[in-house]
Image (tube, rainbow, N blue to C red):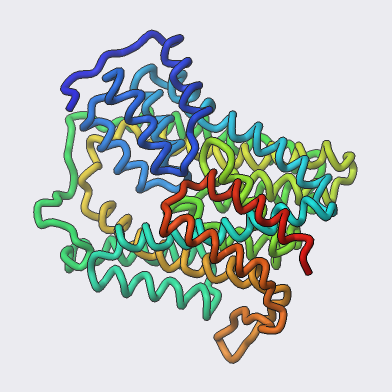
Amino acid sequence: MNTKSATPPFREAISVYTKIGFLSFGGPAGQIALMHRELVAERAWIREDQFLSALNFCNLLPGPEAQQLATWMGWRLHGTRGGIAAGMLFVLPGALVMLALSILYAFAANLAWFEALFLGIKAAVLAIVLQALLRIARRSLNTTFKKAVAVSAFIALFLIALPFPLVVLGAGLLGTMVAFIHPKWLALGSDNHNATLSSRRPWRETWAAIGIWGSIWAAPMLLILLTLGQDHVLWQIGQFFSQLAVVTFGGAYAVLAYMAQEAVNGYGWLQPGEMADGLGLAETTPGPLIMVTQFVGFLASFRTPEPFSPIIAGILGALVTTWVTFAPCFLWIFAIAPWIERLQNARWLTGGLAAITAAVVGVIANLTIWFALHVLFVEVERWQAGPFHFDIPQWTSLDWRAAALSLFAMVLIFSFRWNVLKTLGLLAIGGLILGYVR
């Protein structure tokens, strides 16, 4: 374990951040492991205890924890300029690749070979989401209370269709209360003190960060409001993803079902199967998985482009989406990073996070079923009885090709332990083969 850290030259740090940005495949676990290897194990720029403390705190924040951890490490080494550099270089490679793939998708979506290709990709995505569900459940549901929270969150979303933000915030509030009343229900130790205090409270830095980055976050929205108005799709995109950025606790999988349902049923930006396509594309790019939001923003603007051309509108939609998705991450880090050592053991925070993480299991279970229905069946209907309403498939519309490919993907992932990229690649080939079989 490293016991000391050294501050590197800024130029050398930039080269390492760039390397991390281009190699950050494999989701949060792989990205965090890569950062640990590069900055803690090999170069000793960050101490082990600092890295773990920051990682735990980033899990408390909305948004992609790996991107926020990268921003924190840059801030820790070189202040604000380091945080901006590390955070942006973590996002930019994936954003550029995702934009290129979104353009290709928009122009090739009606081609038979392209649809066949994504038949396999959707099947792989279903297996990947199921794997994420099981992994998070094993790690998170270590008490009966947490299991009850997970089941309650699933029922609230799947059967009653409560708003996702309400479910997450409700779980967090419940966790903060239970942390003081019955901490063992959340597997919190009795030595979890209310705070680790330091002599100075960094309010000045916090308020300055909120003012500056809040303005940066709002700037494109103000420009859209003044030039295009609230009825334009760019305003709707910016408003929706700004709201999503505040409640994205638990990683990308936790919000995908909510985002997909709103994008498909609420705004009509995408067709049901296209959300799985976007997730498949995001899985193949470096950077955070939440980059799938850019795919949604691009297609939404591409399909309602006025007064722009479709390609210009799509690029603007992608830029607005990326801006309002990731600008808040810088706000959270620069506002809260000075408090990390002071608040890392706050019981109300750890209790709220534990309950939210448990609820996320129920959220991802809802996502898994939503994806399964729209990947495996051609026709899905809405069933309602009183306060309960949920989707049920037309069993005669089962696509046997999608079912066979999904089963094959599960064998590769669970039995042979293939990684995401290999699975997506082989399933894409399988989709091309079966796509022309009726």
Asked if 239 appears above or below 21 in the picture, the reply is: below
The residue at 33%/28% (across/down) is: 37
Using the rendered view, name the quadrant where residue 76 is placed.
Answer: top left
At x 49% / y 54%, what residue is drawn? Answer: 247
The quadrant of the picture occupied by the N terminus is top left
- The reply, left or right, for residue 406 in relation to residue 269 is left
Residue 361 appears left or right of 238: left
Q: Where is residue 351 in the image (x, y as percent from the top left)?
A: 26, 58
Report whether residue 356 is seen. Answer: no
Q: Report the front residue among 371 and 293.
A: 371
Number of numbered discs overlaid on the protein picture = 0
Provide residue 121's location: percent of width, then percent of height.
Answer: 63, 54
Q: Is residue 291 left or right of residue 236?
A: left
Answer left or right for 406 relative to 379.
left
Rendered position, 182 above or below 390: above
What residue is drawn where x is 17% and y is 37%? 197
Q: In this view, does 429 lie above or below 171?
A: above
Residue placed furthest toward the bottom: 385
Quadrant in the picture for residue 414: bottom left
Q: Which of 13 and 396 is in front in this view?
A: 396
Q: Position of residue 95 (x, y in %)?
A: 62, 35
Q: Which corner quadrant of the image does residue 50 belong to? A: top left
- Can residue 368 be seen in this snapshot? yes
Pick the front one: 237 or 434: 434
